[in-house]
Structures are given as structure tokens and as C-alpha cells.
Amino acid sequence: MKIYSIAFQSLRRRKAKTIFLIVGLFLSVASVVTLITVSENINKSVAINLDEFGANIIITPKSDQLMINYGGLSLGEVSFNNSQLSENDLQKINTIKNRKNLSIISPKLFETVNLKGKNVLIAGVRFSDELKLKKWWIINGRSPLSPNNLLVGSNSAEALHIKINDTLLIKEQRFVVSGILSNTGSQDDALIFMDILTARTLFHKPAKLSIIEMAALCYDCPIEDIVSQTASVLPTANVTPIKQNIESKMMAVHSFERFSLGISLVMLVTSFLIVFANVNASVTERTKEIGIFKSVGYRKSHILKIILTEVIAASLTAGLLGFIVGVSVAKLVLPFLSMHGLISFTYNFTTLPIAVLLSLFVGITACIYPAIKASRLDPTVAFRFI
Amino acid sequence: MSLIEIENVSKEYKSGTEIVAAVNNISLEIDRGQFITIMGESGSGKSTLLTMLGGLSVPTKGKVLIDDLNIYALPQNNLSDFRREYLGFVFQAFHLIPYLTVEENVMVPLAIGDLNRQQKREIVHATLDKVHLKNKSKRLINELSGGEQQRVAIARALINDPLIILADEPTGNLDSKTSEDIMDIFGFLVEEGKTILLVTHNKDYQAYANKNIFLKDGKLDGGN
């Protein structure tokens, strides 16, 4: 028998106290692991959803002339000169270091046409990307399925008396209105959207682009890096981050992180107090036992070893159980916290050492004072109990 | 040379504003292999004297020399080591550790030693044999009678083969037949060369002793 055997026998045979000690630590570790895992997954999911929710980078041609405005952003001389972006620029963007962070790249070609006696701006877009980028769009009718389908903004539809399934003649080519957008309160209300390839043919601009909108996933990379990398491959373009958009996204993500951190701290402090009270009470209760150890020649360090071994063993068990239960609870809880569809559940194994170290830290710090108190117990005081 | 020398030892406590002398200027010499009883009324200072002899309570005045060693001049760790090597304690209420088995309780003093598992086992079984408990080594303490528990406590006191056994009312919680068995064990230990200091109220035990010390109000009160 060694000193640690005494500690293990104490844990093994004083089951109720051991369970109470482990549960005190386990609850906080499990809660913290759940919060960390849920928070990580939700943060990622929220960040990805937010990043995909509208563009956060706009690329426009460089120009010395007055700009045309698109939703408060300059578009260069989109309709009036030849200094436009091109299809090649899309390939260049795909060569940047952080290309994996680019979730959506949506090129646009703008052209004004006269329709029913009124000038209207046509936006040639890739509908697959545009619909992903503008998740807030509500389409009355259906999404365009063929190259001759149009989506019409609410203001344009009203001004030009356009209805779903109407046929419009643009540059002598027939188009069918597959859907009309509900009012978005944005520049989109005044536009008519058509397939970009059709627009290029129609307006004789085979490889030209007016602007490129991008949604970059900024959860784990700074947007400034993506902007500077894009600017370096497109020296003749203005690459502009939409700061307000990015900051509000990051604020949403960080506020959840802060909330999780706050809850975790409360749980840890509570756990610390439970363990402290438990070990302190245990030391008082074991005064007689400590007196026996002292009477048979145990040093202060031996008494400390016994108490610390017990707490470390309990902390390791609680840390391990806390990790397993915490991750499992997070997995169960996540679907209920999902805003849109499923949050993909991932956990990283760095949470395991964090859980175990956290448990050890709380356990050891909470028991240091009672353990030192026990080791310093005056044998005569212990003897009075004897 | 005496094994134990107590020179003008006093132990004072503060009780409110008053200072009370639990032991008052006692000097004693005890030789190796003696059986000493310390008797006196409750509060006469018997247990206090025993704790001072056991290196557990620092005297306010005076010196305690054991084997020519001034034990209270030793650093804390050395005093602990001294207790382990020289002394064995037996208490009235046995004071065994309830979550350990008989064998483990007896082995507690060896847990901080250098012996290997097998050596420890052999010593424990030999010691349990001395107190006739070898067949109950795997039992938990609460499965034993009072007399058996006290025999476990004696075995624990003997495990390091100490020179001195300090026993504070070891038969106080036992019936007369069991008490007699315990006293026989002590008698046997004295024959083996142990020095025993026994605090007791029981005057019948004077017959076992080489020397009986009587205390009254913290002072020596005659004796033989």
C-alpha cells in the first residue's frame, strides 16, 4: 500500500462523498463543454449564414469619371464606357490565397434599355449565385429556369404594368416574366434581372462585367486579407468591403461568444464553490483521520498528497465524463437551436484537454486551501477529536 | 541511561483571561522495557503528558528527551519521522480508518516507507498474528467487535516495531474479559522489550506495571 492507495480507497469506499465531489465538478465541466461546443457550432453556422446573407465585398471598375450608384456603392461608368470588368477577372479571383473563404461570387452586367417608353436598368446575373446571395428575395411566381426568363423588381413591374408570365420584347428578343420580386426596399426593386449569358449576347458584350459582388466567409479570416488579395490580382478594379455589413455580422457572432463565456464563468465559479465547500467540509470531518495520520508519523506533505490525489482523481474522472456528456448534450441540443435548416455538428478534440484541465484547475484550486489547512492541523487539535 | 527523560515539563493553556497549567513542572525518567501506568482523576493532566511524550504537543516549558534526543528541538519533518520510528499510539476509541480493511489499517504507517508490497504484507501478517487477527485481515473495521478493533489499533501501533507504546485508556470502551486480553497483549509486548506508558483509571492495572505514576492537578502525586 502506498499513499495514493489510501486516497483511492477513500474515494472507492466513501462513495456518496466521492460522487458528490465528482458531480460538483462534472456539472460545470459538462456545462462548459456543452456551451463551448454549441457556441462554436452556432458561431460557425451563424457566421456562415450571415456571410452568405448578402455580399460583403463589391468589385467595381476603376474610373476617373463620375460614378453611377448601385445601392449606395459606386459602379464606375457601367453603361457608358469600355472600362469594365471581364470574365477573366473571375478566374483571377479564384487564384487568391483565401479562395476557400469565398462562398459566393456573383458577377453582374448592367445595361439600360427602353421598355414601354421608359428607361430601365437590366441586370444580367447568374441566377444560381444571385438567389443564394439574396436569400431575402421573395419571388411571386417562380425562379427563372430558362435563358429567356426574367425576374422583375417590384417598382419596375408597377411602373411598366408587368405581370407574371407576361412576354416582354427587349432588343427584338422575346422574354417571359417568370417571377416578380416582392418589395425589398433596395435598388433591386427598380431592376429587371436576366441570365448573364443572354444579356451578353443581347447587348453584344461577350466577356464584359459591370460589377462583381462577393460573399466571403469571414468567421476565421479577416476580410481585409481577402480584399487586399483580390485587389492585388485585379489592379484595375476597386475592391471595397462593406464594413457596416461585416461589423454587424461579427458583432452578432461575438455577442454570442461573450454570452457563452459569461455563462461558462458563472458555472465555473459555482463549481469552484461546490468543490471548495465539499473538500473543506471533508477536511473538517476528517480531522480525526488526519490526527491518526500525524500520530503514525505522516508529514504535512503526506497529508497534502492524500487530499490532492483524491481531488485530482475525482477531477480527471469529472473532466472525462464532462467532456463525453457535454459533447453529447451539445449534439442533442443543436438541432433545436438551428435557425435555418440543420447546423452541421462538429467537435474538436481540443475540447477534451480543455475539459480535463479545467476540471483539474477548478478541483485543485478549490482544494488547495482546505488541503493546506488539513496538513497544518495542529496534532493536539486533531488529538482532541481522538 | 533512561530511554525517556522528562525535565521540568509544563503545559499551560489560556482559558479566557486565565492561564491554566494542565501539566505543571513534571520531571520523570523511564527506562527501556518498563510498563508504566499513569493514573489520576479526569483533568489531572494524564493525556496531556502522554501527548507531550508522543511529540504531538509542544511543552510550554521543559524538555522531553527520548533516546537522548530532545524531540521538540527537531524540525517538524524529523519529529514526524521520529514518531514513526519510535512511537506507537493506542487510543480509547480505537481510531481506525473506517474505509480501510484490517490489513490496510495496520499498513497505514508503512505506506510512507520504502518497503515493497511483499515485505509490507509479511510484516502486517506477522503483526496481525501477534494480536490473533490474521484470519480477519480482509474485513472492514465495522465488521469487527470492539475488542478486535482495539487489537487492530495495537497491531497498527506495533507495525513499525517502535520502542515505546503510548496507550490512552485503551480498555475504556471494552468489557472486562476483552480488557484482560488487551492487557495480556501489553504484558507480552513488555516481555518483548517494548516500553509501555498506559494512561488509565483502572487501579487493577497497577499489577501489570513496573511503575505507577499518579497525577493530581498537573503535578506528580507520589507513586511507587
Image: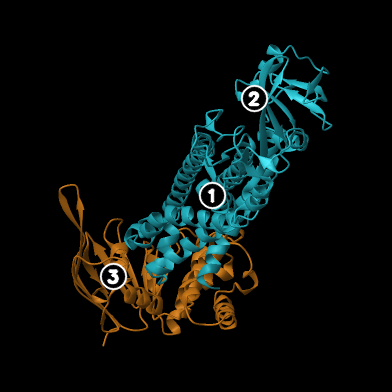
Q: Amino acid at mark 2?
A: Asp
Mark 1 — residue?
Answer: A25
Query: Which one is in front in this view, the residue at disc 3 or the one at disc 2?
Result: 2
For the question of whether residue B172 can be seen, the reply is no
Real-space Cα separation, disc 2 to disc 1, in angstroms: 55 Å
Q: Which sits earlier in the primary sequence, circle 2 or circle 1?
A: 1
Q: Colour of chain B?
A: orange
Q: Which chain is cyan?
A: A
Mark 2 — residue?
Answer: A188
Please state the chain letter of the residue tagged with numbered disc 2 in the rendered image.
Answer: A
Q: Secondary structure at mark 2?
A: helix
For the image, the number of numbered tags is 3
Image marks 3 and 2: residues in contact by CB distance under 8 Å: no
Please state the chain letter of the residue tagged with numbered disc 1 in the rendered image.
Answer: A
Mark 3 — residue?
Answer: B213
- Name the residue: 56% across, 83% down: B119
- Compared to residue A306, the image places residue A181 above or below, namely above
Specify whether disc 3 shares its chain with disc 1: no
Viewer-side residue, A273 vs A10: A273
Viewer-side residue, B74 vs B62: B74
